Each structure stands twice: as structure tokens, then as C-alpha cells.
Image (tube, rainbow, N blue to C red):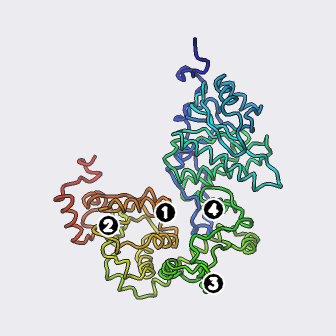
């Protein structure tokens, strides 16, 4: 007797949609560009152009039940018995096996939750059931948080169950009175932040829209997934005021008190340091953070004064734009100080310098870890010197080479210092960095690099490459373009043996 839940062989279905034949977001037609807005040209986007993420996305109006994907999303009510054309078709195509599992095993799904079932006769292996909120003007914050949870929990199920392709339908529906555009902002932003954190989870994500919602997604997708640097700059002024937290969850600034990452920073404001006009003395910050007097430093602080935020809105400047402009102003103050101070003592260490160009003509900045004594060197002066050396090259693509050779604990600056220094640098440093090569990495340095690029510098994570020997570096940069200290050559020969020939990538031997 034939099992009633057996899945129909997919090869015999004429209506099956092969997602490999659908156009990816990064290959969609770009609109004609307009002139750059001088206000936004120098500002860093919170959603920078990422071709690797764009290549995972597809915007489509195809039938959800015909997609040949690992999972599709079914938006329903708490008892999963909502009667609407999409739900009816999912259960009709899935067959009695799907109906039975939902009724007897899942039964209930609360608002904001997501539950997983098999797909049975559907082309999709799984169905993810989720319940979107009802929209009410009195409880907008609750509705936004619940909708975010729907999308986030759905994506988390994909991560937990090795689901590589997902057909994501609109959970925010007019059946529950949710405004389509407001819901789309949350949906797309949540997907963006999830893919940034877990880029290896999904190979393909399809935003499955109806004819009524597809135009909204066409308009909003470029804000969170720009397809070029130009589009990234042009969409800055169109971003909403609430950009969510690091996971995309909605944040209401006037209603939420945020705990500061470093209580020591509050003391700085008490001492009258103007963080917009002057550079922060990082050395003092780290000394203070090592010995905090809890009775003197307030533990919590409002991140931003609501009255100040309202004033900016009335002036036509969003909080995000204001923060980016202030970050630029702080960096320019740092640069002015770097150019005015005598930093010859730092330069004499030969721990950082320019050294020729790579095989693509891009300037190379060299860091020699062993030459930097973190215990004796003033970290703020080191930062000033780095800005002075690098500011002239970061306007265009450039490369960094870091020699970790023979370094020890005394050569390693505190992680807090690296984090603060990274955030103080201008957006051009991250945008135009093409490759960051770490030569002679250790197990510990690889772990520290992973931690730093995952939680602090995610926008350069895929630009960092570890090289076990100098000879591998020479495939990227001609030897005559690199000024490498002799002790590094000697160490390299000691651990890797006499240097052997590594063909150039474009040479006949290297092809």
C-alpha cells in the first residue's frame, strides 16, 4: 500500500520553478545613476555594498508552492488554520501528511514564533510556519518587535536545520492590517543583518512577493542591499530613522535606555571632553577602564538626548546621518593633530610604513608586529602616526601586509584599543581596503583575528587572509616592491625551508 505522505518525484512536475534559472539581485538591472548628494557622499552607509550577500537574493512573484527550495515560509494564525489562498494552496499541495503533522504535532504557534514541519508533497523539503502580529496604532512597538521575531526565528530555524535555500513570503499581511511598506523595512533589514552575521547559512533567499507588494520590495531592497557603490551613496538619504540594532530589531530611541559598553567613557564626558571636537586620549581611557571607581562613574547613561534627536529631525537630518557626520568630524580632528605633531619617535620604530605597490598597482602598507612595543609606546601617538601614514592612500584601493613574525604578548595592543581605534577611522579605510594579509600567523592570532572581524570589523572579514610564508605573499606583490626586515626572511627560511619558486597567478605555470 502506498504511503499517503510520500513525496511526488520532483522530476515529473511541469510546474516546478528552478531557482537556479531566476535572476539574482546582484545581476538585476541597475537604474540610471544620478548626481551624488554632497551631504551623503562622505558618509559611510550602515548597509554597505556587499556583492556576496546580493548574490544570495532573488526577488520574485512566482508561486510559493512551486519553488524547488529547501523550505518555504507559511504565514498563518495562531492555530495554523487561517483560510486564505496561499495557506489553502500550501496544504492542498502538501497533502494529508502536512495537514496531519500541523494539526496533531504542532497544533499552535504563538505570534512571533516559527515552527518547522516537513514539506511532504511540496517541492520544498520543509515548511516554516510563523504567525505575524496584528497591527494596532496603540501598540506599534509591540507589533514591530513581534514581526521582527517572526523573520529572525524563521532564519534561525534555517541555521539550525541546515536549510540552504528559503522561499520567504511576506509575513506582514494586510489580512492583519500591517502596512506593507513598514513591514517590508523590518523584513529586509532583518535578513540583511542575519546574512552579515551568518553569511554561510543560506545560499539562496527568495523574497516571494505578490503583485501588490513586489513594487515596494523593488523600491526598498536597494536601501539595505545596494547593488553598487553609487547606489549605496544615493540611498543613504532614503533610509528610515530607525535602522534597528545589530540584528535589525527595531529600536525606539525615546523609549529605551541603553547600557553603555564602557562605563569609563561616562567619566570622560563628566571631565568635559568634547568628543565631537577633540580626539579621545585612548591611553587614558584604557588606564581608567582597568580601575573603575563604580561609585564615581555612572553605570548607565542615555545614549542620546531625545530633545537633541528631535531637533535634528526638525532640521531635516536623521540621527544616522548626524552620527556619520560627527564621526567624520572627529576623524578630521584626529588627522589635523597627526599632521601637526612630531611623530619621528614612532616612525623610527619601523613598525609601520609604505612599501611599493602590489601586482594591480595598489599601494601597500606594511606593519611589522615585532617592532611595536605595546607596553612602552603611547597608543594614541601610534594611532596618530597610522592616520598620518595611511590617510594619503585610503582614497583609492590599497593593501595591508601585517608580519606577525616572532611577536609575543609585549607586541600586542589590548583588544579594547584595537576596537576603539577601528571605530575612529574614517569609512574610507574599510571601503577601499582590498586585502589584509597576515604573514606567519599563529593559532592564537587566527583566533583573535576571527573574534575581531566577527564582532567588531565584520565589514572587512572577507578581506583578511592568512599566509604561512613570505613566498605566498610574493604571488600577490613583487619582491622588489616589498621592504621586508631581514629577521623575517631568516625566520621564514627556518620554518618553511629555502624559498622555492611560486609561479605568478597570471603566468603559464600558475594557470
Label whose residue precedes the other's in the sequence (4 or 1): 4
Gap between marks 4 and 2 measured at Cα:
38 Å
Q: Position of residue 177 (x, y in %)?
A: 80, 45
Label 1 to label 2: alpha-carbon separation: 19 Å
* Residue drawn at 61 percent across, 62 percent down: 35
* Residue that numbered label 2 is attached to: 404
Q: Which residue is mark 3?
A: 270
The answer for how far apart the CA atoms under marks 2 and 3 are is 39 Å
Q: Quadrant of residue 249?
A: bottom right
Give me the disc on residue 467: none
Of residues 406 and 1, the one nearer the viewer is 1
Relative to residue 110, is residue 444 drawn left or right? Answer: left
* Residue pointed to by mark 4: 236
Instruction: Determine crowd level at label 1: few under 14, some 14-19, many 20+ residues with C-alpha closer than 10 A.
Output: some
- Pick whichever of labels 2 and 3 is earlier in the sequence: 3
Query: How far, Cα to Cα, is label 3 from label 1?
Result: 29 Å
Amino acid at each position: 500500500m502506498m504511503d499517503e505522505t510520500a513525496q511526488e518525484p520532483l522530476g515529473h512536475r511541469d510546474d516546478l520553478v528552478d531557482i537556479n534559472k531566476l535572476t539574482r539581485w546582484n545581476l538585476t538591472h541597475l537604474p540610471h545613476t544620478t548626481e551624488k548628494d554632497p551631504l551623503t557622499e562622505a558618509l559611510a552607509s550602515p548597509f554597505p555594498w556587499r556583492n556576496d550577500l546580493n548574490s544570495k537574493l532573488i526577488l520574485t512573484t512566482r508561486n510559493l508552492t512551486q519553488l524547488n527550495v529547501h523550505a518555504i515560509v507559511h504565514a498563518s494564525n495562531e492555530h495554523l488554520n487561517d483560510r486564505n489562498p496561499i495557506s489553502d494552496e500550501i496544504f492542498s499541495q502538501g497533502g494529508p501528511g502536512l495537514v496531519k503533522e500541523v494539526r496533531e504535532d504542532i497544533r499552535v504557534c504563538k505570534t512571533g514564533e516559527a515552527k518547522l514541519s516537513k514539506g511532504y508533497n511540496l517541492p520544498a523539503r520543509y515548511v516554516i510556519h510563523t504567525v505575524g502580529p496584528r497591527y494596532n496604532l496603540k501598540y506599534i512597538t509591540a507589533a514591530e518587535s513581534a514581526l521582527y521575531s517572526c523573520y529572525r526565528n524563521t532564519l534561525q530555524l534555517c541555521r539550525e536545520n541546515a536549510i540552504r535555500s528559503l522561499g520567504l513570503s511576506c509575513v506582514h499581511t494586510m489580512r492583519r492590517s500591517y502596512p506593507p511598506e513598514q513591514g517590508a523595512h523590518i523584513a529586509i533589514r532583518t535578513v540583511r543583518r542575519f546574512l552579515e552575521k551568518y553569511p554561510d547559512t543560506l545560499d539562496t533567499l527568495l523574497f516571494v512577493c505578490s503583485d501588490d507588494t513586489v513594487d515596494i520590495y523593488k523600491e526598498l531592497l536597494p536601501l539595505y542591499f545596494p547593488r553598487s557603490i553609487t547606489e549605496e551613496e544615493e540611498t543613504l538619504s532614503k533610509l528610515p530613522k530607525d535602522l534597528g540594532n545589530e540584528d535589525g530589531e527595531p529600536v525606539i530611541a525615546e523609549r529605551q535606555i541603553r547600557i553603555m559598553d564602557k562605563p569609563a567613557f561616562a567619566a570622560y564626558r563628566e571631565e568635559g571632553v568634547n568628543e565631537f571636537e577633540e580626539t579621545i586620549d585612548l591611553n587614558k581611557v584604557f588606564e581608567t577602564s582597568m580601575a573603575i571607581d563604580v561609585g564615581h562613574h555612572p553605570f548607565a547613561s542615555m545614549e542620546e538626548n531625545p530633545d537633541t534627536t528631535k531637533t535634528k529631525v526638525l532640521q531635516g537630518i536623521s540621527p544616522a546621518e548626524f552620527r556619520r557626520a560627527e564621526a567624520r568630524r572627529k576623524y578630521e580632528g584626529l588627522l589635523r593633530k597627526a599632521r601637526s605633531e612630531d611623530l619621528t619617535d614612532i616612525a623610527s620604530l619601523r613598525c609601520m610604513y609604505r612599501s611599493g605597490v602590489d601586482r594591480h598597482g595598489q599601494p601597500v602598507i606594511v606593519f611589522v608586529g615585532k617592532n611595536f612595543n605595546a607596553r612602552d609606546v603611547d597608543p594614541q601617538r601610534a594611532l596618530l602616526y597610522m592616520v598620518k601614514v595611511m590617510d594619503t592612500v585610503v582614497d583609492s584601493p590599497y593593501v595591508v601586509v601585517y608580519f606577525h613574525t616572532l611577536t609575543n604578548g609585549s607586541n600586542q595592543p589590548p583588544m579594547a584599543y584595537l576596537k576603539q581605534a577601528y571605530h575612529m577611522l574614517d569609512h574610507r579605510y574599510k571601503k577601499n581596503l582590498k586585502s589584509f594579509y597576515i604573514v606567519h600567523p599563529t593559532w592564537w592570532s587566527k583566533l583573535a583575528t576571527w573574534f575581531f572581524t566577527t564582532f567588531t570589523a565584520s565589514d572587512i572579514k572577507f578581506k583578511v587572509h592568512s599566509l604561512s610564508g613570505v613566498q605566498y605573499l610574493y604571488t600577490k606583490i613583487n619582491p622588489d616592491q616589498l621592504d621586508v626586515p631581514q629577521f623575517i626572511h631568516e625566520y621564514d627560511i627556518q620554518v618553511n625551508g629555502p624559498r622555492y619558486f611560486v609561479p605568478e597567478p597570471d603566468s603559464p605555470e600558475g594557470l
